[in-house]
Amino acid sequence: MNKVTTVFWIAIVMSVIFVLWGVVSPEHLGSVMDVALTFFLQNFGWFYQIAATFFLVFALFLIFSKYGKIKLGKDDDQPEFSRPTWFAMLFSAGMGIGLLFFGVSEPIAHFANPPFIEGDTGEAAIMSLQYTYLHWGFHAWAIYAIIALALAYFKFRKGYPGLLSATLRPLLGDKVKGRTGIVIDIVAVFATIFGVCASLGLGAAQINGGLSYLTGIPNNFTIQFTIIAIVTILFLISAGTGIKKGIKYLSNTNMALAVILFTVVIILGPTIFILDLYTTTLGSYIQNIPAMGLRLSPFDSGNAAWLQAWTIFYWAWWIAWSPFVGTFIARVSKGRTVREFVIAVLLAPTFVCTLWFCVFGGTGIFYEYTMGLDVSGQALETALFLVYEQLPLSGILAAITIFLISTFFITSADSATFVLGMQTTNGSTEPPNVVKYIWGLILAASAVVLMASGGLEALQTAIIVSAFPLTLVLFVMPFSMLKSFKAEVKPKPNSGAQREKARSKLKNTEDQINPT
């Protein structure tokens, strides 16, 4: 424990107070969070929209900029992991549980109740996937890419601690070592806790929903509490093995199982319908990214409420997750160049996410639109299992899904304990196991408290509230990177302004030699 910092002790005390608040008075905690949720959604939706778009624009700028050749490490550093393993690790940490939880339920929910148009139509089907792609596509991964890039660059190239506060040193100087840095890192810790809690809650809810479908056990808080307790033991065991064993092997297992599920559903489902739908919706998404990414509804309260509940919630969720996912992606990305890193983190996962949602969500839409199956009437956690019932091998698919949710659950929580350990031990890439165990227990307890005080809505509230101060910090990070990049990538001797200066100096010399 000699590695822990002031951030660790302050964050632990605040976390324990929060958990005790939820245990002693869950109703009061729930009511306070409801008020906070309403305030932030109604007053700062525009802020989250602009923030998400800003990160995407900056990521695209970096791909084509002169800074793309800068390496995330010393010039002779090589990547620690192969590209397939690297991709599996960043993807499993980034969105694993959410893809399974929302794979069918989000597109079918938008199909039945879309913004701006009438539901249950062909047009609604296209819009449902457009907005699902928006929520899980370029904007989300741009947020991850920028934060992860800053952390990796300053850690491996500049030798700074792997902390959010350290990425602002070019702008704030030594203030990042004092109270300002402590506040920034505590904000990152709490955003990480609440962001990951949401995934743990979603995972427990869907495991419970799947088991209820398969075995008939009750779908309630008691069962979900039991699931969280069991999985907590498993991910604490995994956390003790380190990043090169537990997380690495689980990530590769997750990707293999996800590919199996994806392949089986696209083959056994309405294949041609899905392929036609993907071609159409991908084009519509790319065409309408700017408008959707900045769209709000100031003249229609119903559409405004929809955007707040879905789009604004997602931007806050990804921002809350960004210290966790960003720190983890940075840790496994040493030796990559800026351009390679941004292209990989931005494009590859977006393509996979859009294809995944079209296959699973499109299958759900097909059964509701063409066969009258009430998929949209299901709870979010059970819609996927109803779709499975329409396919051959439904029992096997459900069993694989429950197992995959569990491994994603373990991977996300394992990765989160590692990241929280880094954030509270001055950026150590090998935080002590006891620190990771403490954060693992805090994560599990926070998830249980939030679910007891308001279920998934309480998780949503915690995300949006914790993401707001973090967004203010993240807004500054790209400018800090640019300042450091500019100092590193100096103009070539005979380029640009220097060539012009040389020509001017030569002309002055000629005028002195040959006066008119």
Image (tube, rainbow, N blue to C red):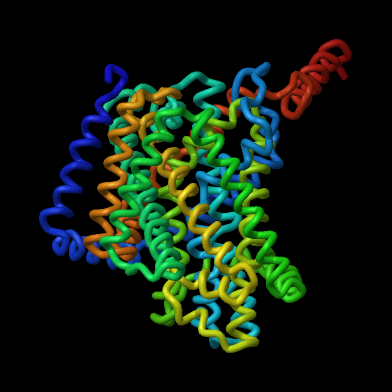
> Residue at point 55% right, 72% down?
107
Residue 497 lies, in percent from the top left, at 72, 28
Task: Report the residue that reaches farthest toward the front.
Answer: 215
- Image quadrant holding the N terminus, namely top left
> Residue at point 30% right, 67% down?
220
Residue 139 lies, in percent from the top left, at 56, 55
Instruction: Please tell me whether residue 206 is drawn above or below residue 193 in the rendered image.
Output: below
Residue 308 makes an appearance in the image? no
Identify which residue, 75 or 203, lies in the foreground: 203
Identify which residue, 16 or 10, lies in the foreground: 16
Say whether residue 385 is left or right of residue 181. Answer: right
Quadrant assignment, res 182: top left
Quadrant assignment, res 360: bottom right
Task: Report the residue that reaches farthest toward the top.
Answer: 513
> Residue at point 34% right, 41% down?
233
Say whether residue 71 is left or right of residue 401. Answer: right
Quadrant assignment, res 162: top left
